[in-house]
Amino acid sequence: MGTLQVDECVEPVTIVFAERDHVGRIYHQNSPGLKLGWSADDELYGVGLAGAAQFCTALSSEARTRAGEPLVTEPVRRGEGEFPLNLTGTPGEADNREPDAEAAPESDERKRKAEEKRLAGNDMFRANDFMQAALQYTEALGQIPDDCKILANRAQCWLKVGDHEKALEDACRCTEVDPTYPKGWFRKGMSLHAMKRYPEAIPALLEAEKLEPSNKQIPEAIKMAQLMARKQASEKR
């Protein structure tokens, strides 16, 4: 196996090769307990380092080996497209540059952007600019499509501007993503109520009440839906 990668292993990790010549390149990041060795040599060499920077360990050049340094560890140098430049070239060549910190994982970056847009949407909602709030929530969902809180927030925006179909769509998606989130059920119930689908609104509102019994708005909404459902039924007779 020519290349190995060991990341985020804070516990001891030992890699022993069958022969010295089998040692390839070992990329590692924040793995302070990493040790390397080979069967013909009883000694294990501690090469792991803590921190966000990524390193590459390989066999030393012949000159260094003679000086008693069988392995050398260097910071990973990256070129275009973050491609590691250490992948080729002579192992053990000196590199005195400071190691680069690893880029933030894509998922973390998406969460950060989504949170920025969510907060901007909240500001727009408080300013009663519901269409702009919906736009900000839409951009947030572009980063994290299945965030139930953002879905519930956008559903409320659609309710405010009278787009009940979109409100129901977001609310239903919210309950699918997290059936334990009460606002999803409440928004679903209120969307159905706004569409005069009162018998369907009642079960959704009852589910919201079960999940959030302290919310005083929900019992009032249930009573109104029940009243309107009875009235609607009597008018059909």
Image (spheres, rainbow, N blue to C red):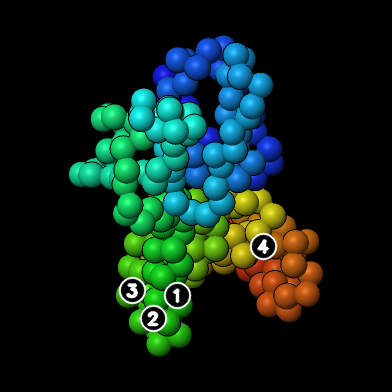
Kindly report the distance in space between the C-alpha atoms of the residues bearing marks 3 and 4: 24 Å
Image quarter where the C terminus lies is bottom right
> Do tag 3 and tag 2 residues touch (Cβ < 8 Å)?
no
Percent of width and height locating residue 44? 63, 29
Question: Could you tell whether 43 is left or right of 49 in the image?
Answer: right
Please give the residue where the numbered disc 3 appears in the rendered image.
131
Kindly report the distance in space between the C-alpha atoms of the residues bearing marks 4 and 2: 23 Å
State which tag comes first along the sequence, 1 or 3.
1
Residue 94 occupies which quadrant of the picture? top left
Q: Using a 10 Å C-alpha cutoff, classify the residue at mark 4 as few (fewer than 14 neighbours), some (14 to 19) or many (20 or more).
A: many
Please give the residue where the numbered disc 4 appears in the rendered image.
182
Kindly report the distance in space between the C-alpha atoms of the residues bearing marks 1 and 4: 20 Å
Q: Mark 1 or mark 3, which is nearer to you?
A: 1
Please give the residue where the numbered disc 2 appears in the rendered image.
124
How many numbered marks, from 0 up? 4
Q: Does residue 1 show up?
A: no
Please give the residue where the numbered disc 1 appears in the rendered image.
119
SS of the residue under disc 4: helix
Q: Out of 164 and 154, give the one closest to the viewer.
A: 154
SS of the residue under disc 3: helix
**Disc 2 residue type (three-letter):** Met
Q: Mark 1 or mark 2, which is nearer to you?
A: 1
Which residue in the rendered view is the most extreme toward the bottom? 127
